[in-house]
Image (spheres, coloured by chain):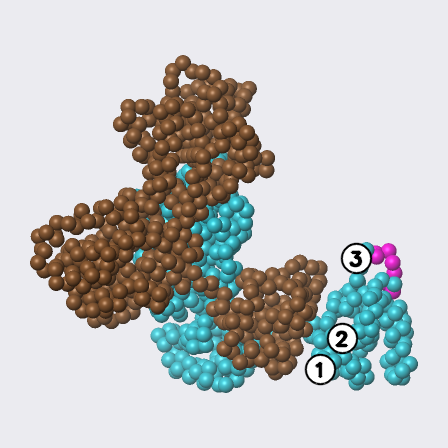
Chain colours: A cyan, B brown
Amino acid sequence: MAAEKSLALFRSRLCDTRFVHSAFKSSPESNYSKLKFLISSSISEGCNNSVLLLGPRGSGKAAVVELVLEDLKMEHPDAISVIRLNGLLHSDDNSALKEIARQLCLENQLLFSKMASSDDNSQFMIDMLRECGLAHKGVIFVLDEFDLFTQGKQRLLYSLLDALQTLTSQAVVIGVSCRLDADQLLEKRVRSRFSHRKILFIPPPADDIQRLIEHLLYLPRESSFSSKYVSEFNSRLSNIFSDKKFKEILNSLLDVDGTISNLLGFLFRAVSCIDMDSGFLSLENFKSAHLCTQRQPKIDALQGASILELYILVCMERLEFKEKNSYNFTSIMKEYKAIHDAYKTSDNYANMVCLQAFEHLLDRELISFADSKGWNQPIEFRPVKLLVSAHELYHGLKSNSACPAILQKLFDHESYK
Amino acid sequence: MPTLRSASNPSSSPSYPKQRGGVSTPNKKRSRSKSTESTPIDARSPAKWSSPRRSNGGVGEICNGIVYSNLSKSPRKRLYDDHVEKPKWNPRDPAQMLAVKEALHVATAPANVVCREEEQKRVLEFCKACIEQEKAGSLYVCGCPGTGKTLSIDKVKDSLVLWSGEEGLQSPDVLAINCTSLTNTSEIFSKIVAKFHSRKKINGRLSVLQHLQHLFSQRHSSSRRMILIIVDEIDYLVTKDRAVLHDLFMLTTFPFSRCILIGIANAIDLADRFLPKLESLNCKPIVVTFRAYSKDQILKIIQERLMVLGYNVFQPLALEFCARKVAAASGDMRRALGVCRSAIEVLEAELRNASQEQEVDIVTFDHMDIALSKAFKSAVVDIILALPQHQQIILCATVKLFRHCKRKATTIGELNRSYSEICKSTQIPAAGTLEFSSMCSVLSDQGLLKLGQSKEEKLRRVTLQIDTSDIIFAFKGNRFFQSCLEQ
């Protein structure tokens, strides 16, 4: 009972980006505080500003923007209106202007006409900015996928940033992009009008990560759980966190991808393996979650392959190693017979059986045809190629318990152990 | 910055603050600007500050002596005035902070446009001549972004209207168009017709351009007003066949045309490249170039803006540093103002974190240094250092490959091989092929690598988007990566 409730609590926390990023709200050096200070000072002073948020995908840029806007809306209820554009949807200038006009109409309860031309829309936008400036209402433009707006003639960016140059408007332009050189993509006119403020979202350092995990996984004291359960849970969790193995797992996870969304996925898997009887998390949960993230699907597929299929794959590998450019089933069979003659193995099967195994491999996409046009030819004569690398094949052979030693020996002359 | 400090007089600067309580610096700022330029600011300031000197001559003499001997033109009166009249800036006061930020904001149009008097005079003379002789003409204004073109032309427009009122001539009709707002390049003609000839019916058979041409080639009985057309960002009108731009400038060549056309753009040779025919007709537009601002001009403009405030906000050394850097980079005034504003924000951040006793009341050289490095330094090295370890190894592998093979491009398969070699030699478990491909696409999303398209994942082309020297510099202090790179 307690286990289900805590599982539900953790899942809801990990899926709610607002809760995740509110862990960094209090520190003054965090990106949240920088962005909030920038926007709130622009709104309160009535001046225009533009800023670019840069960072790899999944580092929480959009989440931080949403958090800041939500907090600002609560503090100044009527002083802010938000216009959201996305570079994937509105890359064409005309559709972007139409979308801006539509959202402005929505915010201010005006009627929107679909028939308005792009000229009318841009005039409307300029007039609205002026009106909002006179009414001391700030307009915040959030441009997602900012680098996609820089394709073409950049008219939208130019007209937006040019509107910021006049005293009557009060607007903030926030660009969100994953390309770190997004401001180099701007044309020189647009770049001159853009104030070079950038907020970089780099992967957080180790103690910040520690703080974040504690923020997410510690049960709150004043909740509906029994206090005994809460204190037992939290103490077990802090034991896990101080364990060296946990730190190793965390480091190997973050060494590949240090973004926050990767960490959240890992924690979600770990939490879903919670022991339902006792209701406590253990180190094994984190280890199995780590294994999930390190899956190698092709090696898993090789684990379940039959011995004949492994033979066929090894023959193909040998043919490729001998640098035969294209080979087909018949040449594979020749190689197979050659191995059989040389080593006198017991796994000698007839052609028909081998052909069945071959077709099975084709279905599982461990091999495929090298050409795309030979629909009329019978399967035996069409050229094929391997879809697993030699490295993966080597590991697959090792992990397959039924693999005969001869195959591994045949592989030994490859030098990549 | 040893050069700056040696330029200022060693005897005056250190001793001065002790005597005057820290108000020496604004004085030095003015004296430097005075000695380097000979423009209206020079003529204005002595007259402005003359009176206090006469009334308080006694107190000023003693300290003035030091300054007077070192500088050619001593603003002794100003010196005294700074001590008496200029209060200290209190950055904690929100009203004062607001005033400072507003004075430095790009959107605030200054009352006088300094450093562009030459160019404004030329344009004004041209327009005046056209109006007096009732002849049409065209002018082309060019220059880098942020050099004050649109601002100056606006001022010229206002002064032209004023002048024509004084002279008793008919003031011209003005139309200002920004070509980025046109969806279709030939819309510009419809706009001209709509503004000036709205009363006349448009003949349905002719196109708008032909209508205009027709109008301009006929003599009209009543003398009409001159038309001033200001076309901003005129290079947006350049199409493949250059017809629209040509026709626009040709409108001024008709016998009864009454328009004065001023085009504004960035390219210096627009007239030569796109309007060759006009030269043969002997009506090439006059070209007025707005050159990029020099360090002294930037300094003067910022000081002009700050003069409306009653207090000193910046240390003159800081301002000069900023002007020097921006002038060397681009000469763009917007950049300079942006950097000054961000220096003020650095000061604000320091105030928020500092305790109450610390007196921070002027933007120093250090604040300006931080603001300039934020604006000008590229963040590539920081980004490389912040990448996760395996992605850094991938960048190392790329550098190694390119160094060995002296090529600029490789494939994902080869890169994977190089990457696994490095991992093997340093005993780190390598990531699998799937993870490797996803790490490469993350790096290409960020703009560090560039991945091509291919049917097979292994054969996708990989090129570096950043300099190898940046990568090598980033890993300089790191022994682990040094050993990787050296193998």
Q: Do marks 2 and 3 both belong to one polypeptide chain?
A: yes
- Amino acid on which the number 3 mark rests in the picture: Ser
- Region rendered in magenta: A374-380
- Amino acid on which the number 2 mark rests in the picture: Ala
- Circle 1: element type: loop
- The quarter of the displayed image where residue B196 is located: top left
Q: Which of marks 2 and 3 is nearer the N terminus?
A: 2
Query: Image point 36% across, 70% down: which residue?
Result: A27
Q: Where is residue B11 in the image (x, y as percent from the top left)?
A: 23, 68
- The quarter of the displayed image where residue A71 is located: bottom left
Q: Nearer the viewer, residue A84 or A181?
A: A181
- Circle 2: element type: loop
Q: Is residue A137 left or right of residue A156?
A: left
The answer to the question of whether label 3 and label 1 lie on touching residues, with beta carbons closer than 8 A, is no
From the image, tell me which residue sits under label 1. A417
Which corner quadrant holds the C terminus of chain B? bottom right
Farthest top residue?
B221
Of circles 3 and 1, the one toward us is: 1
- Chain hosting mark 3: A
Query: Image point 43% across, 51% down: which residue?
Result: A192
- What secondary structure prevails in the magenta region? loop
Which corner quadrant holds the N terminus of chain B? bottom left
From the image, tell me which residue sits under label 3. A372
Disc 2/disc 3 C-alpha distance (Å) = 26 Å
| Depicted B199 relative to depicted A155: above or below | above
Judge whether residue B354 is colored magenta.
no
- Chain hosting mark 2: A
From the image, tell me which residue sits under label 2. A305
Q: Which of marks 2 and 1 is nearer the N terminus?
A: 2
Disc 3/disc 1 C-alpha distance (Å) = 34 Å
Disc 2/disc 1 C-alpha distance (Å) = 21 Å
Q: Which of A417 and A25 is in front in this view?
A: A417
